[in-house]
Each structure stands twice: as C-alpha cells, then as structure tokens.
Image: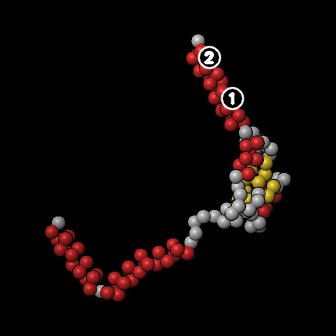
C-alpha cells in the first residue's frame, strides 16, 4: 500500500508541475462545461403537437387543453394515425398523441369502483 501512495504522490506532483495540462484540465471540466450549460435552455418552447382522438371523450379534451403556450403550439387534429405519422416524418409536428377508442375505460371503471367503495363505507358507518 505504501508503494501505491508513493506512486500516486509522484504522479500528482508531476501533474501539478505541468501548468499546460492543469489549465487544459480545469478548462475542459469546469469553464467549458459552464459555458455550454449557459447556452442551453432545458424548457421546451413552441413544441408542435398533433393528435388523433378516436375516443372523443372528456379526459382527452382536458389533456389537450393543458398543452398551452409558450411551451406548446395549439394542437393539430388529424383524421388517422397514418396522417399523423406522415406529419411527424415530414417534421411538421414534433409530438403525436393517439387516444384510442377505449382510452377513458380504465378511468371510468376506477371512478365507479371508488364511488362504490365510498358508498359501502358510508353505509357501514351509518349502521
């Protein structure tokens, strides 16, 4: 173990004596990363969205209503998935959403089960 530390210390001293290498290392791992990070904005802006809504339900409309400016452009409706895929391929839109005909079934089923549970709990407490 003593040999490891002596070789390690020798390498660190050699590294610190070479100012050019120290400057390149500091620049590439700190200053350059900071400069690149300042140039990028992580928040999306003006994302174009297309959708196909086979369900024509309330939940899909609510989801689409939450996609608003400045992050998203107004959603564009397509008649079929083929048209949507073509628009994505042609780079007319960035994101495509497809709401299947049975999109709302799990939500309404869960809501019905929850309401039934509440009714049972209420009846149990009243008895």
Residue 26, horizontal then vertical, whole percent: 38, 79
User: Closer to the observer: label 1 or label 2?
Assistant: 2
The answer to which quarter of the image holds residue 106 is: top right
What is the secondary structure assignment of the residue under circle 2? Answer: helix
Tell me what residue is drawn at x 19 percent, y 71 percent: 5
Tell me what residue is drawn at x 76 percent, y 57 percent: 75
Q: Is residue 57 visible?
A: yes
Q: Residues within 10 Å of mark 2 (few under 14, many from 20)?
A: few
Tell me what residue is drawn at x 68 percent, y 37 percent: 107
Q: Is residue 32 above or below residue 45?
A: below
Residue 13, horizontal then vertical, whole percent: 23, 81
Quadrant position of the C terminus in the picture: top right
In this view, which residue lies farthest toward the left? 2
Q: Is residue 94 visible?
A: no
Tell me what residue is drawn at x 74 percent, y 67 percent: 91
Q: Is residue 44 above or below residue 66?
A: below
Query: Where is mark 2, residue-wise?
Result: 123
What is the secondary structure assignment of the residue under circle 1? Answer: helix
In this view, which residue lies farthest toward the top? 127
The answer to which quarter of the image holds residue 121 is: top right
Quadrant position of the N terminus in the picture: bottom left
Residue 103, horizontal then vertical, whole percent: 73, 41
Judge by depth and name the residue closer to the eye, 120 or 36. Answer: 120
In this view, which residue lies farthest toward the front? 126
The answer to which quarter of the image holds residue 51 is: bottom right
- Res 99 label: none
Q: Is residue 58 above or below residue 82?
A: above
Judge by depth and name the residue closer to the eye, 22 or 126. Answer: 126
Query: Where is mark 1, residue-wise?
Result: 112
Compare marks 1 and 2 and give the one earlier in the sequence.
1
């Amino acid at each position: 173990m003593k040999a490891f530390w002596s070789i390690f210390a020798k390498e660190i001293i050699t590294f610190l004596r070479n100012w050019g290498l120290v400057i390149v290392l500091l620049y590439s791992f700190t200053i350059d990363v900071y400069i690149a990070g300042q140039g990028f904005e992580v928040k999306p802006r003006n994302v174009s969205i297309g959708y196909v809504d086979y369900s024509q339900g309330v939940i899909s409309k609510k989801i689409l209503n939450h996609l608003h400016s400045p992050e998203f452009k107004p959603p564009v409706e397509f008649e079929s998935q083929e048209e949507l895929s073509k628009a994505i391929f042609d780079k007319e839109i960035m994101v495509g959403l497809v709401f299947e005909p049975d999109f709302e079934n799990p939500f309404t089923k869960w809501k019905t089960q929850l309401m039934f549970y509440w009714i049972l709990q209420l009846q149990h407490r009243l008895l």
